[in-house]
Amino acid sequence: MITVENLTKRYGEFTAVDDISFQVRPGSVVGFLGPNGAGKSTAMRMMTGLTPPTSGRATILGQTYRELHNPGRQVGVMLDASAQHPGRTGREVLRVAAVSVGVGRARVEEVLTLVGLTGEEAGLRVRNYSLGMRQRLGIAAALLGEPQVLILDEPANGLDPQGIHWMRGLLRRFADGGGTVLLSSHLLHEVQIVADDLVMIGRGRIVAMGSKDELLARGGTTVQSTDDARLAGLLEAADVPVSRTGSGLVVDAEARVVGEIAARESVVLLELRSGGSEGLEEMFLGLTAATSREGDAA
Amino acid sequence: MSTDTSQSPAPAVGGDADGAVSNPSALPGRAGVPFVRTFQAELRKMVDTRAGRWMIVVMAAVAVLILAGFVIWGPAEDASFAGLLELATLPLAMLLPIIGIMAATAEWSQRTGLVTFVLEPRRGRVVLAKTLAAVVLAAVVLAAAVAASAVANLVGGNGEWDLTAAIGGGMLLALLLYVLQGVAFGLLFLNTPVAIVSVLVLPSIWGIATTAVSSLQEAGRWLNLDQVTQPLLAGDMAGRDWAQLVTASAVWVLLPLAVGTYRVLGREVK
């Protein structure tokens, strides 16, 4: 369990994290989603005692990070996969951590297998690792002490689609065993694959949170027709909010409403469904547009 | 505020709202990690990187070359045990501080602090472990130099075993001061090149300044680490030499160590 209460971090005038509160329950994989610079990493560094908060607090399993006994045994943390000494082999990185955490060499080989790094790859220096391999190494280090909680910053960054699905399986099994996972991402489709619940953050503030399905349902109806421009006009005339995406329209109404209007006006529909990634994407852009630095472009 | 009746006002996400999944609690025990394990990890980190290994290899190779060169070409009557050991420790005095620097700066320049300080959030203990590990490493390296010098003396020296406790202890103390100075400057600057250049250049500049400017000469005698360690290495420390050693070490080792530790304790790890 991770609890964040009124957590705030200011750097002079700039507020990186602005009074965020949420709780991640055991048995869940929660995605911490937001555009770059939204405050995800700062929040995670405050949770793990690396950055002192300006106000508020974060606890893990009921204690602040600095109070935890042998934190490596309770919380697996990966804040930056590329923050590894390039002159150490992957296996050596884990062995040093194992000394500190107090687990044996057998556990090092176990986690290497778990994350799919071969013995040969583990013997390479981190300098020669791809970003995907570094991510796997970082996750291996996080899992080393068989923790209850995982805090991972951008763990899917640099993974290929297959790797992202592998990570989903790994984290799902971890959560099914009663574990708590909080992972951050700035890519919606990535976090959609890996996480079941989302906390969306923009400019340091939480803009939405809940289960993925719940947020998806809020995302409206996706529709595509032979004449999207005309359909959009008809919907607007009927006071139904519409927004355009690359491949059609997202409508803030039930599928039935859209279907009826289309049938009445004889518009040929190619696709009509509620929710879907376009809806969530639209919402993600919409929610963060007001708070993101790219507000105008979005 | 959520209507959740649990202990926290924070709205919850994920998992089972009914609390069917048991809520694990934190492991009992004192905060952090036992110091012995932090120390072991820090000692290991000094020699397990490519750079660290090469420093050791270069130190050993240079020491062996110097010893061999002196035994073969040097004036044989000077090749006593103490004389050979003094030569062998020259590269150690140069390179041990750099190992100390790298141990202190890697957490920041290679950003491994993101792992180290997550595994042991009490950073003061990590700093202490690094300092002790540097001391142990210096002692081990000196022991190896003693062994190599003994072999050199047997093979090609004059066979005189003239190493006194004063000289041996003085060498150990001087090496410890140099390696600690490395750790201290590493902690102070948290940047490898800046720290290395500072350790090599700042004392020299100060040394030149104190010889060139007459008004600084007296200060130089008290605050020049290279100068005050000379009687230490020669094994003839008198009362005033000890006082000068203390003042110079305070300025060049303890002060940067204190300021550097303070920096590490408060700094945000990114």
Image (cartoon, coloured by chain):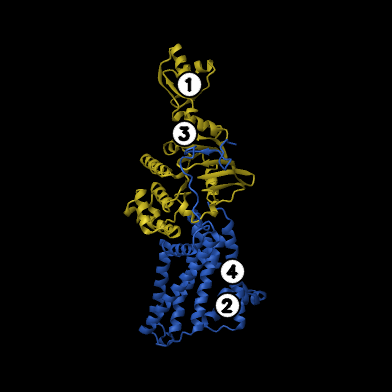
Chain colours: A yellow, B blue
Q: What residue type is disc 1 on?
A: Glu
**Which label's residue is closer to the chain start, 4 or 2?**
2
Q: Is residue A105 above or below residue A226?
A: below
Q: What residue type is disc 4 on?
A: Leu
**Marked residue chain, label 4:** B
Q: Are marks 4 and 3 on the same chain?
A: no
The residue that label 1 is drawn on is A254
User: How far, Cα to Cα, is label 4 from label 1?
Assistant: 72 Å
User: How far, Cα to Cα, is label 4 from label 3?
Assistant: 55 Å
Image side of residue A117 versus residue A197, left or right: left
The residue that label 2 is drawn on is B228
Q: What residue type is disc 2 on?
A: Val
Disc 3 secondary structure class: helix
Badge 1 crowding class, 10 Å Cα cut-off, few under 14, some 14 to 19, many 20 or more, is some
Image point (41%, 83%), residue name: B74
* Coordinates of residue A154 in the picture (x, y in percent): 46, 44
Q: Do the residues labelled 3 and 2 touch (CB within 8 Å)?
A: no
The residue that label 3 is drawn on is A212
The residue that label 4 is drawn on is B254
Instruction: Please state the total of marks drawn on the protein image.
Output: 4
* Coordinates of residue A96 in the picture (x, y in percent): 42, 59
Badge 4 crowding class, 10 Å Cα cut-off, few under 14, some 14 to 19, many 20 or more, is some
Instruction: Identify which residue, B41 or B113, lies in the foreground.
Output: B41
Asked where in the image residue A124 lies, by quadrant, the reply is bottom left
**Marked residue chain, label 3:** A
